[in-house]
Image (tube, rainbow, N blue to C red):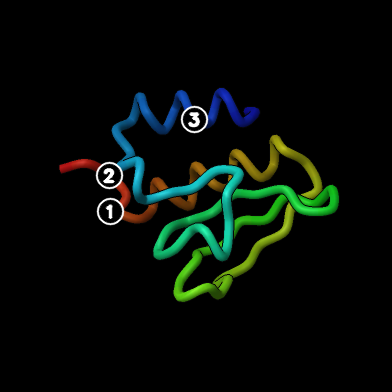
Amino acid sequence: MNLPELIGRLKQLGARPDAYSIGIGVPEANETYCLVQENGIWLIYYAERGQRGDLHEYATEEEACNAFLELLKNDESVWSR
């Protein structure tokens, strides 16, 4: 899965747009899950108060997108009610 596919899948599944950020991380993103690429490494973390919490690193876009989707699937607060 790549970024456009991930974005489409999240919309299809009904994820709240304010629950995640793709391509924009700290400091702009706050209280949201982030997926960003920095220096050739894909990062997933939870942004809160300008800090990166629960940071995970991935070598490929595919690995990061799959992991991001699974992370969001496991958090009920991400999904529209």
Q: CA distance from mark 2 to mark 3?
A: 14 Å
Q: Which residue is more in the foreground, 21 or 65? A: 21
Residue at (44% x, 63% y) in the render: 30
Residue 22, percent from left and from top: 55, 43
- The image's mark for residue 43 is none
Residue that numbered label 3 is attached to: 7
Of labels 2 and 3, the one closer to you: 3
Quarter of the C terminus within the rendering:
top left
- Dot 1 lies on which element? helix
Residue at (35% x, 55% y) in the render: 75
Q: Quadrant of residue 44?
A: bottom right
- The image's mark for residue 79 is 2
Q: Do the CB atoms of the residues marked 1 and 2 lie less than 8 Å apart?
A: yes
Residue that numbered label 1 is attached to: 76
Q: Amino acid at mark 2?
A: Trp
Of labels 1 and 3, the one closer to you: 3
Residue at (49% x, 47% y) in the render: 21
Residue at (41% x, 33% y) in the render: 10
**Relative side of 55 to 81, left or right:** right
**Relative side of 65 to 41, left or right:** left
Structural crowding at the residue carrying mark 2, measured as other residues with C-alpha within 10 Å and reported as few (<14), some (14–19) or many (≥20): some
Q: Amino acid at mark 3?
A: Ile
Structural crowding at the residue carrying mark 1, measured as other residues with C-alpha within 10 Å and reported as few (<14), some (14–19) or many (≥20): few
Q: Amino acid at mark 1?
A: Glu
| Sequence-earlier tag: 1 or 3 | 3
